[in-house]
Amino acid sequence: MTLDDLTVNFSHLDRDSLLSDWEWLLGGEYLPILLSASGDAFVQSVNNGQVWWLDTGGGEFTQVAESAEEFGRLLSSKDFVVEYFAVQMVGDLLQSGKILSRGQIYSLSKPYLLGGMYELSNIDPTDIEVHFSLTGQIVQQVGNGKS
């Protein structure tokens, strides 16, 4: 499995508004630079270039690199990729026939914060914009967003 299998292309979407429903957490200071097929986003600070991981399932927001260059090096690390890209889950989804089309990302049908489990029967290909909109709203309303 390659990084191409574990990420989704979002060049056809508006990078400035893609995470608008996460604005309460991001504060307009971050833009997405990489989306994992498993539904999370790596965002870069427009102020200092730091790269952060936005876990859309649990609302975690964690710095992973000081710069885009350091992030690029991390993407070459098997341990980093395994930790942040749900390699096993994505492989299982592909083997089960749940293949992403252009503009889709894997998303929990019943969100984690609402009791949903990370299991194949609860994960489906979903429109990228719908995924980030719904997860941002749910995490904000449930109040589990952490910074």
Image (cartoon, helix red, strand yellow):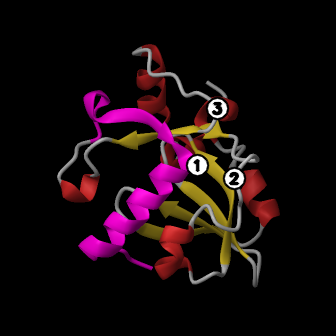
- Crowding near pointer 3: few (<14 within 10 Å), some, many (20+)? few
What secondary structure is found at the residue carrying circle 3? loop
Q: Quadrant of residue 15?
A: bottom right
- Crowding near pointer 1: few (<14 within 10 Å), some, many (20+)? some
For badge 1, the amino acid type reads Phe
Tell me which segment is drawn in magenta: 118-147
At 74% from the left and 46% from the top, the residue drawn is: 12
Please say if the residues under marks 1 and 2 sit with CB atoms less than 8 Å apart.
Answer: yes
**Majority secondary structure of magenta residues:** helix
Picture coordinates of residue 33, whole percent (x, y)? 71, 58
State how many labels appear: 3
Q: Which residue is mark 3?
A: 102
Residue 61, above or below 113: below
Question: In this view, which residue lies farthest toward the right?
Answer: 69
Question: In this view, which residue lies farthest toward the left?
Answer: 115
Checking the image for residue 1, the label placed there is none
| Magenta span contains residue 30 | no
Q: Which residue is mark 2?
A: 74
| Magenta span contains residue 142 | yes
Picture coordinates of residue 104, whole percent (x, y)? 55, 37
For badge 2, the amino acid type reads Leu
What secondary structure is found at the residue carrying circle 2? helix
Picture coordinates of residue 57, whole percent (x, y)? 37, 56
Q: Which residue is mark 1?
A: 80
Residue placed most toward the observer, 27 or 82: 27
